[in-house]
Amino acid sequence: MNMANVEIALEIMAKGMGGIFVAIVVIMAAVMVLGKITGKIKDKEEE
């Protein structure tokens, strides 16, 4: 196994894992924002 190929593979894998992490953070932020928006609307409707 060539070490240069291993380094290239690790770099590609790190970019992929970083992309997945960023996507999860974006989805979590969107869910939190939408939860706060819809939560306020439901509270107003119940009163």
Image: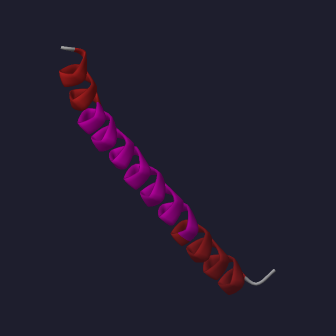
Pick out the residue farthest to the right.
Answer: 1
Tell which of 9 and 18 is nearer to you.
18
Toward which corner of the image does residue 14 lie, by quadrant?
bottom right
The reply, left or right, for residue 39 in relation to residue 27 is: left
Judge by depth and name the residue closer to the eye, 6 or 40: 40
Residue 27 place in picture, x, y as percent: 43, 50
Q: In screen coordinates, is 32 left or right of 1?
A: left
Q: Main secondary structure of the magenta part?
A: helix
- Is residue 37 placed above or below 27 in the rendered structure? above
Magenta stretch in the rendered image: 16-38
Q: Residue furthest top?
A: 47
The residue lying toward the viewer, choosing from 46 and 3, is 46
In depth, the one of 11 and 17 nearer the eye is 17
Q: Quadrant of the C terminus?
A: top left
Q: Quadrant of residue 39?
A: top left
Q: Is residue 32 above or below residue 25?
A: above
Q: Is residue 9 left or right of residue 45?
A: right
- 15, above or below 26, in the image: below
Indicate the position of residue 25 as horizontal and vertical percent values: 40, 50
Residue displayed at 24% across by 38% down: 37
Q: Is residue 19 magenta?
A: yes
Q: Quadrant of the N terminus?
A: bottom right
* Quadrant of res 44: top left
Color style of the picture? secondary structure
Task: Examine the structure image and report whether residue 23 is included in the region drawn in magenta.
Answer: yes
Where does residue 15 sit, x and y in percent of width and height? 52, 71
